[in-house]
Image: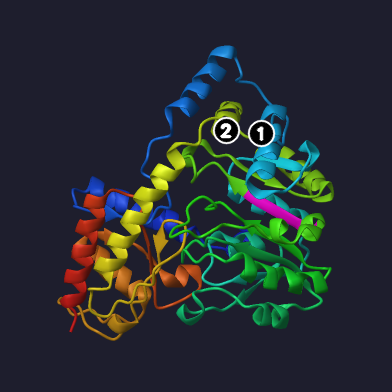
Amino acid sequence: MSFLSDAVQSIKPSPTIAVTQKARELKLQGRNIIGLGAGEPDFDTPDNIKEAAIDAINRGETKYTAVDGIPELKQAIVNKFQRENNIIYNTNQIFVAPGGKAIIFNALMSTLNKGDEVLIPAPYWVSYPDITLLAGGTPIIIETSPLSDYKITAKQLESSITPKTKWLIFNSPSNPSGAAYSREEIKSITDVLLRHKHVWLLTDDIYEHMTYDGFEFSTPVEVEPSLIDRTVTLNGVSKAYSMTGWRIGYCGAPEKIIKPMRAIQSQSTTNPTSISQWASVEALEGTQVLIPQWVKIFKERRDLVVGLLNQAEGINCPLPQGAFYVYPSCDGCIGKITPNGNVIKNDEDFVTNLLDLEGVAVVHGAAFGTSPCFRISYATSTELLEDACTRIIRFCAGLS
C-alpha cells in the first residue's frame, strides 16, 4: 500500500514555479541566468496600496477575518464588477481567497465527483488539469492551434460536451498564449452553454486589463447575463496591480456555490491575509492611473520580443492580443542537434538545452498542453528581454 494518496500521485508540481526555482538556483551558483518563466510583473506594488497596508497594520487589522473576506473588500469587488464589467452582484455572491488558484481549487472541490468532466482548452494554464484531478474530476482537453489563434470554436465546444461535463474553464486573455476572445467569439461560446444547462462556467479574467491594439475585453456573464446563475467569474489583484505576493483572488458566483467554497476554505487556509485584504480595497477603489501606463510598457515589450524571436531560425512567434506572454512555436528546431551533440527531440529538450547553453529559462509548451512551443513572460525589463532574445537567436543559429 502506498503511503501517498492516489490524488497527489496523479498531479505534478507546477512547471512554471519549477523553472523559476531552477533559474534561482543556477544564479546562486554564479551562472548568468535570465529567468523568463514567472508570470509576475516587474513593477513595484503602487505606493498608495502599500500605504493602505501599513495603515491597516497600524490600526491593528491583524486578526482573523471572515473566512471569505472582509465586508469592505467584498463591497469594493461588487463595485468593481458593476463599474468595469456591467455585472450586478451582492456581497453574498462575492468570495475572497488567498489567490486565484484557491478560487479554482475551492470551486472544483465543491462540485466534482469521480467521473465528472471539466473541459479545458489547450494551451492552458498549468494548474487547471491538476486541480481538476485533485478534486476527483477528469480533465477533457480541447485542442487548438495557431491557425485558430489558440482559441476554441463553438463547434469544438459543442462536440466536447457530454452528460458528464460539469465545467468549462475559460481563460481570456490566455496564459500562456495571450489569445483573447472578442465579444462575438464569446457570444458563440455562451450560445452553446445556453443549450447545455448542466454545464457550469469558470471564467478566469485575471489578465483583464492587459490587452493591446485597441482590443476591448469582455467577460462571458457581461455578454450573456442569463449565465450568471452557473458562472464563477474569477479575478484578482496580482497582475493588474503587481501584487502577486499579496495573494488575493476573488470571484462573483451564485450563493449556492459560495457556501460550500466557504466551508472548504474554513477547513484549509481559513481567511486570506487581513493586511492584504485592506491593501486590495485600496487597489480596487483607489487611483487606477498606473494600469494604462504599465499596459503601454507591456505592449512595447511584446512588440520587441515578437520582432526579435521571429528573426530566430526555426521559431515562429504569433502576436498575442493580451496578457504578458508570447507562445512561439519551435517546430523548426525539432530534430536538430546542439553544438555539444544533443538532439532536440521535443520542446522540453529545446528549453533544457537553451538553459544549459545560453542561460535563458523559459517554460516548455508540453506543460501547457500544446507542443512544440515554449512560453516567455515579457514582464521584465527591456534590457533583459533584448539580451534573452539575442541568446535565443544565437542558440537557434547554432543548431545543425
Horizontal side, residue 259 vs residue 152: left or right:
right
Q: Quadrant of the C terminus?
A: bottom left
Q: Which residue is mark 2?
A: 280
Helix, strand or loop at mark 1? helix
Report the magenta stretch's main SS.
strand
Residue 146, x across and y down, in percent: 46, 78
* Closest to the observer, 307 or 395: 307
Q: Secondary structure at mark 2?
A: helix
Segment colored magenta? 230-234
Label 2 to label 1, Cα distance in Å? 9 Å
- Image position, residue 311 (x, y; %): 22, 73
Q: Can you tell which quarter of the image residue 124 is in?
A: bottom right
233 inside magenta stretch? yes
Identify whether 256 is placed above or below 400: above
- The picture places residue 156, in percent across and down from the top left corner, at 65, 81
Residue 181 in view, yes or no: yes
Please name the residue shown 72% across and 62% down the image: 201
Is 34 displayed left or right of 45 in the figure? left
Task: Check the image and report above or below for 156 versus 19.
Answer: below
* Amino acid beneath label 1: Ala
Q: Is residue 271 above or below residue 347?
A: above
Where does label 1 land, which residue? Answer: 76
Residue 1 visible in the snapshot: no
Given the current orientation, which residue lies at the most extreme top position? 59
Q: Are marks 2 and 1 in contact (CB under 8 Å)?
A: yes
Which amino acid is tagged 2?
Answer: Ser
- Residue 99: within the magenta? no
